[in-house]
């Protein structure tokens, strides 16, 4: 049976098909004169993929689990047809695309250790955590390999609320993180170790600081410091993950699920009644990622404004504040105007 590249959304898988393809007609989506391969070429991949799932009476449909986490197929109907064809051709416990499944115990125990670790860090031991278990047993040091770079053209934003009306715009120097002597703890940084929190969307940063109607806010624009000559690498939690990594599918599944959990915790808005203990787990994992990947920061999705992404930088001197403007929020939906 012939399958075409457009049956899939996974970038790596589409590239694999293109590299081996001839031109013909797809037997699954009925595309004509398109890059196709024999589906047998993908049997090993799907065998390896299906081995990561186990039937479960109260589980989720296989096709929903795959599409919800990775968007492997171009659409669910095509995914159903491909999976239901393949399960009849390979040795697998999976019977159909509609079968109720969950991840196997190895994956669940690995990923769910994040919740156990959070409790340990807060209530049991903090400074002598078993790093060897995280790296050698769980392999977490290999889960954060996806990196992006900051270029000179990238712009990021940071906002500060004014506490009195008609105050002057904050100067550029006051739009950075506080000095270490007065830096309080945040989701990513411990007390006394300031990190620079930015957003790639100007409106998102207003949501992050909870600006409300008639608030006056200074908004700074940041770009890469021109004195920085080295590449600045950022661990990317916003990527569209791919599954097509033969012999590494289990690792990629664990990585995606763990990063999703960490990203949710990192993006939680800070609340007035939070305890600094609540921040310890994400502070720990940021330090872990910093040490084991050598990145300069982490990019993750905003939980309060789904259009933008947030960026936390471990060293703020790699950025330059190029402009600050003052605005007043003119509507409750955060439409604003310069003042």
Image: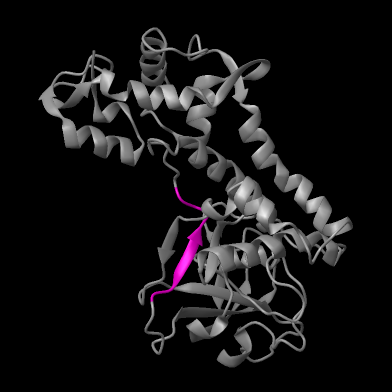
Residue 21: quarter of image = top left
Going by the image, does 75 lie left or right of 168?
left
Q: Quadrant of the C terminus?
A: bottom right
**Does 238 lie within the magenta span?**
yes
Q: Quadrant of the N terminus?
A: top left
Q: Nearer the viewer, residue 267 or 83?
A: 83
Which residue is found at the position 74% from the left and 58% from the top?
Answer: 281
Residue 73 visible, this angle: yes
Residue 15 location (% of width, % of height): 25, 39
Residue 337: quarter of image = bottom right
Whether residue 226 is situated above or below residue 149 in the rendered picture: below
Residue 181 location (% of width, % of height): 76, 89
Whether residue 92 is situated above or below residue 217 in the rendered picture: above
Q: Nearer the viewer, residue 92 or 167?
A: 92
Which residue is found at the position 62% from the left and 58% from the top?
Answer: 333
Going by the image, does 103 lie left or right of 276?
left
Whether residue 71 is situated above or below residue 169 in the rendered picture: above
Which residue is found at the position 60% from the left and 56% from the top?
Answer: 302
Residue 258 location (% of width, % of height): 61, 45
Residue 75 visible, this angle: no
Going by the image, does 32 lie left or right of 213?
left
Display coloring: one colour
How many numbered marks does the figure carry?
Answer: 0
**Does 328 lie within the magenta span?**
no
Residue 240 location (% of width, % of height): 44, 45
Task: Please provide the residue range marked out in magenta.
Answer: 231-239
């Amino acid at each position: 049976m012939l399958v075409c590249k457009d049956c899939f959304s996974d970038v790596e898988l589409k590239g694999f098909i293109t590299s081996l393809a001839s031109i013909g007609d797809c037997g699954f989506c009925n595309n004509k004169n398109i890059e196709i391969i024999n589906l047998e070429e993908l049997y090993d991949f799907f065998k390896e993929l299906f081995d990561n799932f186990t039937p479960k009476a109260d589980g989720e449909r296989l096709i929903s689990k795959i599409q919800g986490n990775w968007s492997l197929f171009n659409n669910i109907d095509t995914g159903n047809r491909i999976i239901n064809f393949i399960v009849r051709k390979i040795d697998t416990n999976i019977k159909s695309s509609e079968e109720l499944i969950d991840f196997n115990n190895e994956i669940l125990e690995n990923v769910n250790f994040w919740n156990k670790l959070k409790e340990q860090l807060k209530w049991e031991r903090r400074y002598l955590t078993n790093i060897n278990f995280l790296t050698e047993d769980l392999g977490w040091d290999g889960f954060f390999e996806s990196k992006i770079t900051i270029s000179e053209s990238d712009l990021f934003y940071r906002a500060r609320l004014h506490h009195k009306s008609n105050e002057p715009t904050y100067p550029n120097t006051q739009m950075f993180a506080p000095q270490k002597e007065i830096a309080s703890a945040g989701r990513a940084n411990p007390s006394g170790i300031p990190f620079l929190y930015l957003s790639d969307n100007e409106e998102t940063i207003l949501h992050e600081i909870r600006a409300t109607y008639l608030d006056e806010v200074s908004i700074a624009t940041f770009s890469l410091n021109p004195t920085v000559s080295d590449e600045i690498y950022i661990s990317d939690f916003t990527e569209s993950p791919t599954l097509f990594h033969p012999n590494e599918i289990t690792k990629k599944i664990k990585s995606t699920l763990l990063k999703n959990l960490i990203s949710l915790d990192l993006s939680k808005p800070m609340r007035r009644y939070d305890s600094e203990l609540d921040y310890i787990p994400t502070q720990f994992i940021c330090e872990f990622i910093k040490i084991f990947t050598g990145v300069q920061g982490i990019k993750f999705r905003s939980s309060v404004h789904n259009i933008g992404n947030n960026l936390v930088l471990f060293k703020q001197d790699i950025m330059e504040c190029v402009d600050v403007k003052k605005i007043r929020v003119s509507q409750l939906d955060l439409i604003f105007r310069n003042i």
